[in-house]
């Protein structure tokens, strides 16, 4: 929260806007993106966002291994390309050098 407030203050200052003239500030975030961090918390590759559709084959592989009905029972969800798990599997299959350096998996949402 402190970082958000500091960023808003900086944006207002850079824009030359008097804070008292602002009635409201809207903030939003996103989920279901894949952000991979290394040992020093450095970003290892560009994020794969929720709307990226490259993981259809990985979704099929997850369904085949777990079973669609069992997956729905365990998670309450279908597996779809926008979710994080298939994206992580895609990186493991297509960028093994990056995958081998992953220390943390986070979402691009901060709230």
Image (tube, helix red, strand yellow):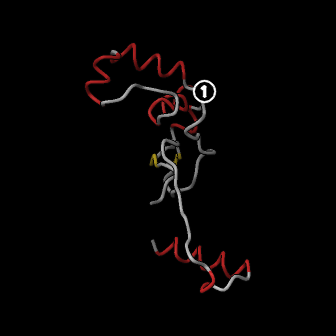
Which of these two is toward me, 34 or 82?
82
Identify the residue at horizontal 46%, vertical 49% (top origin): 106
Whether residue 83 sits left or right of residue 24 in the image: it is left
| Percent coordinates x, y for residue 88 in the rendering | 49, 34
Whether residue 56 sits left or right of residue 17 in the image: it is left
Residue 42 found in image quarter: bottom right
Which of these two is toward me, 48 or 5?
5
Which of these two is toward me, 84 or 97?
84
Q: Is residue 93 above or below residue 10?
A: above
Q: Is residue 73 above or below residue 36?
A: above
Q: Is residue 7 above or below residue 40?
A: below
Identify the residue at horizontal 47%, vertical 27% (top origin): 80
Identify the residue at horizontal 39%, vertical 13% (top origin): 64
Whether residue 83 sits left or right of residue 49 in the image: it is left
Identify the residue at horizontal 33%, vertical 15% (top origin): 67
| Percent coordinates x, y for residue 61 in the rendering | 45, 17
| Percent coordinates x, y for residue 54 in the rendering | 60, 26
Give SS at disc 1. loop
Mark 1: give few (<14), some (14-19) or many (20+) Cα within 10 Å.
Answer: some
Q: How many marks?
A: 1
Q: Quadrant of the N terminus?
A: bottom left
| Percent coordinates x, y for residue 12 in the rendering | 66, 78
Q: Quadrant of the C terminus?
A: bottom left
The residue wearing badge 1 is: 54
């Amino acid at each position: 929260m402190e970082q958000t407030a500091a960023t808003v203050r900086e944006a207002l200052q850079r824009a030359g806007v008097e804070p008292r003239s602002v009635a409201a500030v809207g903030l939003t975030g996103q989920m279901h993106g894949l952000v991979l961090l290394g040992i020093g918390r450095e970003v290892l590759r560009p994020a794969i966002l929720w709307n990226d559709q490259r993981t259809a084959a990985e979704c099929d592989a997850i369904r085949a291994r777990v079973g669609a009905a069992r997956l729905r029972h365990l998670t309450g969800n279908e597996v779809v390309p926008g979710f994080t798990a298939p994206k992580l599997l895609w990186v493991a299959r297509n960028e093994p050098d990056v995958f081998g350096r992953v220390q943390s998996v986070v979402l691009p949402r901060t709230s």
